[in-house]
Image (tube, rainbow, N blue to C red):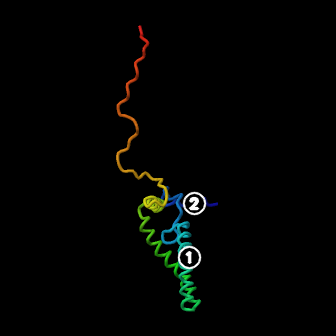
Amino acid sequence: MAPQDPPPRPTTTPLPDRVNAEPPIIKGLSSTESKWAIGLAGLVWFPVGSLVGLAVHQLPVAVLIIATGPIATVWLAAGQMAKLKRNRPDHYYLHLLLHWAASVHLIRSGFVTHSGAWDIGRTLLPARAPRSRARTR
């Protein structure tokens, strides 16, 4: 019997910061982001396609718009999201959106937005301890 060769060693090391991140599936969008983009684009393009189809009295035109509108929208939105996400930490755009919503008072801010001197409520010099009345001999 011939000895078996050891399994080939990987040529690159895994990137530990990417282990728990969702992999990109559509032009840089993760699965969750893709679902949101497809759902929102469908909600926008379904009424638009329906109205255009009714206006021209052609059902195939409505189907064409309803089918191709979300595809084009998701493709273009994925390109914009790739620019927004490039060289930034995970979920950067979500924090950016939350910060914007807090700045226009849509939500209560969970971010520290104060810019100025902070006071910790204490003086820098320690207060003197009161003298005890008992005398030592």
125 versus 9 height, above or below: above
Query: Residue 77: where, in percent of width, then height?
Result: 47, 73
Which label number is shown at residue 42? 1
Q: Which of marks 1 and 2 is nearer the N terminus?
A: 2
Q: Quadrant of residue 96?
A: bottom left
Mark closer to the observer (1, 2): 1
Question: Is residue 62 shown left or right of residue 97?
Answer: right
**Residue at 54%, 58% in the rendered image:** 20
Q: How crowded is mark 1: few (under 14 residues within 10 Å), some or many (20 or more)?
A: many
Q: Residue furthest top?
A: 137
Q: Is mark 1 on a helix, strand or loop?
A: helix
Q: Quadrant of residue 117?
A: top left
**Residue at 42%, 64% in the rendered image:** 86
Q: Residue furthest right?
A: 1
69 versus 15 height, above or below: below
Q: How crowded is mark 2: few (under 14 residues within 10 Å), some or many (20 or more)?
A: few
Q: Which residue lies furthest to the front in this view?
A: 105
Q: Which quarter of the image is occupied by the C terminus?
A: top left
Query: Residue 100: where, in percent of width, then height?
Result: 44, 61
Give how far apart the Cα atoms at labels 1 and 2 are: 53 Å
**Residue at 50%, 68% in the rendered image:** 29
Which label number is shown at residue 5? 2
Query: Residue 6: where, in percent of width, then height?
Result: 57, 58
Depth check: give the residue in front, 46 or 16.
Answer: 46
Query: Residue 131: where, in percent of width, then height?
Result: 40, 18
Kind of residue indicated by mark 1? Gly
Q: Is mark 2 on a helix, strand or loop?
A: loop
Question: Is residue 80 shown left or right of residue 48?
Answer: left
Kind of residue indicated by mark 2? Asp
Q: Which quarter of the image is occupied by the N terminus?
A: bottom right
